[in-house]
Image (cartoon, rainbow, N blue to C red):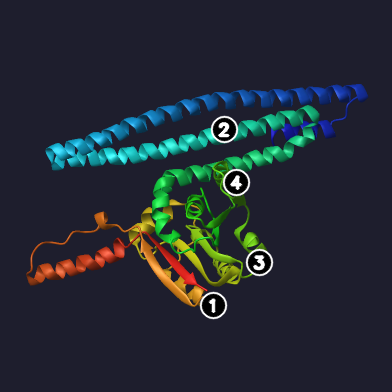
Amino acid sequence: MTRLETLISERKTKKFPGFKSQARAETQALVLVQKLFQDFYFCLEQQLRLIEKTRLDLQELVRLATELGDARDREWDALGSNHVGLIFKSLEWRVEDLAVQCEEARALVERAHLLRAKLEALLLALGEKPEAVKGPVREILGTLRDWRYASFENRFRGPQEKVREQLENYATLFPAGGKVLDLGCGRGEMVELLREKGIEARGIDLNEEMIALCQARGLPCEKGDLIEKLTLCENDSLDGIFSSQVIEHLQPAVLELMIDLCFLKLKPSGVLVLETINPTSVFALVQVYFLDPSHQRPIHPQSLKFLLETAGFKKIEIRYSAPLASEKLQEVPGMDEKTVILNQNLDRLNELLFAPVNYAAIAWK
């Protein structure tokens, strides 16, 4: 029980000697609650200033790292040294890491502004009556949970620019001027990409934090349950449906229902694209799938293809992405019998261990 609820409970259950005593106790409780939220507001202001300073520092670090990258190119052209290349390759990784940190800091600042606005609304509500606080407090707690996953997304999925590059190949599957729905739009990379190409795309996500980030960039995205929103769409009304890194979060029965609904809502010849982690790659399972604690279960490409076939889709393509060429075991030079057998076994291991990280099932109605 929170301190606010305790105060309200005491006010309701404790027997006061008279009306004046009760009124005085209520006034004291209200003053105390206002003081608590004002203290919280002050702490939030302090954190906001600290976050802003961190963001500016990270921007400066990214700028310096970019200059180092430019210096790398000049040094590489001048020296052509493998050692120099390795050093600057390391710097590239650091630049990418700094870019992710800068993105997280920017998201922190935006969320801090949102929390401050909600806190001001809370203080205003307290000035009227304590009972008005319960709903806004629940909203703030929900916002904090959503913010945690948004921060997770920024750190481990990568900057938005990188994700846009990965999604570029899917954008060509949708017709210009068509209506496309992005289920689980996240930070809105695909919605933004499609709209830039003249496609009428909109997004749905259950995470309020993600939706706030999308709407701040002017993207037509709304919060909601994917199944509920799909159900509300008219049958044969969509030219395309896209969903990236979502279906591994769903229980099997929900996934089947989602696929059936997608078939109903797509126009004839409409296309459905479902991207997920490739479980036939051991690297993808260990390094990517198990990284996210909200994943329910991996989905084999053939299992997903079967679900799409039984839903009625007439043409289905499995397309792999995010290859792991640099991770693969290298062949041993030589053409003698033992070396040939060894290299054949290395190929089999590479296929099992280092198959591409992602795959997409592309289905046409």
- Front residue of 10/34: it is 34
- Which mark's residue is nearer the viewer, 1 or 4? 1
Which residue matches tag 3?
234
Give the mark nearer the N terminus: 1 vs 4: 4
Q: Amino acid at mark 1?
A: Gly
Is 40 left, or right, of 67 in this rendering? right
Q: Residues within 10 Å of mark 1 (few under 14, many from 20)?
A: some
- Which mark's residue is nearer the viewer, 4 or 3? 3
Residue 286, x across and y down, in percent = 37, 56
Q: Residues within 10 Å of mark 4 (few under 14, many from 20)?
A: many
Specify the quadrant that holds the N terminus: top right
Give the mark nearer the N terminus: 3 vs 1: 3
Q: Residues within 10 Å of mark 2 (few under 14, many from 20)?
A: some
Which residue matches tag 2?
112
Q: Residues within 10 Å of mark 3 (few under 14, many from 20)?
A: few
Residue 220, x across and y down, in percent = 59, 50
Q: Amino acid at mark 2?
A: Ala
